[in-house]
Amino acid sequence: SEKNTWRLMFCVCNAETGEKMQVMEGDSVTLPTNLSEILDKDTILWGFGPRELIISQITRKEDLTSFFVTDEVSFAGRLQVDQQTGSLTIRNIRNRHSGQYKLTISREKTRYRIFHVHVFGIMISHSLFSCCKHLTWTVQKISINQFWSVCFPDVAGKKDGVKSVSVNEGESVVLQNDAAELQKDDLLIWRFGDEGILLAKIDVETNNHSLNDDDERFRNRLQLNQTGSLTITNARTEHAGLYEVQIRGRGSSKQFLVSVRG
């Protein structure tokens, strides 16, 4: 129905170069080498930034493989390298990982490939997050379920089921995040309704907590505790609906269907 559909803008990058990549914070991105396998005497090198900081290197010689991944703090625990192809994956990405990635493949001759990665944040806003202004825009009408699968691929299909919560008008609604504690690189968000309105966000790495004060329905009613559980105080019938909590770095999601008795 029209009520359950909305407009999503997403990017279509230049298919010929494949060099511009855009990703939302908390997601993973894979930079491909386009190799089927690493051969004898190959060296695969990944550099980051204007100074081309070496973040990964694979060298194969006479069936022996040497392998290096940086322990530089901003990438710690985030890099995964496919030891068959050399492709690089950055998991639970943040804005500081935006920039230039240079791939060097040394074989019979040396080849280079440059990736420009742009990481955009999850903002406390009613509006949809926008893609890079330099890329081509496409507008498509999709359902909310399609939206989750496109914009949140790390959590789509990993929901633990919907939990029903019922309260009387004027009472508080407590939506429990199942995590006993948040981990140091967790990015937790709460969303509400078919439009996926962002209610709250916790970025443990930056110790940043945000609550939605723009939506009059929730103004001065939202509370977050240290584990990311959400409380809506003085509930009204307008607060009834579907709530979802996501921990982006872990790829987990849980939904709550809230009813408020008048």
Image (cartoon, rainbow, N blue to C red):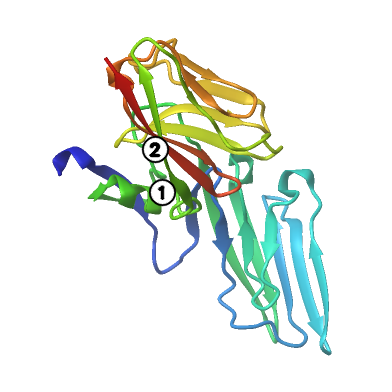
Can you say whether 206 is above or below 143 in the image?
above
Query: Can residue 136 be seen at all in this image of the molecule?
Result: no
Can you say whether 55 is above or below 167 in the image?
below
Q: Estimate the x, y position of residue 12 in percent, counting from the top left.
A: 35, 57
Task: Identify residue for label 2.
Answer: 129
Q: Do the residues labelled 2 and 1 touch (CB within 8 Å)?
A: yes
Query: Can residue 154 be seen at all in this image of the molecule?
Result: yes
Q: Residue at x 49, y 49 (%)?
A: 23
Quadrant in the rendering for residue 193: top left
**Label 1: element kind:** helix
Q: Is residue 37 left or right of residue 34?
A: right
> Tag on residue 151?
1
Q: Estimate the x, y position of residue 28 in percent, counting from the top left.
A: 56, 54
Q: Around disc 2, counting alpha carbons within 10 Å, would you say few (fewer than 14), some (14 to 19), or many (20 or more)?
A: some
Q: Which residue is drawn at 43% across and 47% down?
A: 161
**Label 2: element kind:** loop
Real-space Cα distance between discs 2 and 1? 10 Å
As drawn, the residue found furthest toward the left would be 2
Amino acid type, callout 1:
Cys
Q: Around disc 1, counting alpha carbons within 10 Å, would you say few (fewer than 14), some (14 to 19), or many (20 or more)?
A: some
Quadrant in the rendering for residue 16: bottom left
Q: Estimate the x, y position of residue 217 in percent, counting from the top left.
A: 33, 16
Can you say whether 124 is above or below 120 in the image?
above
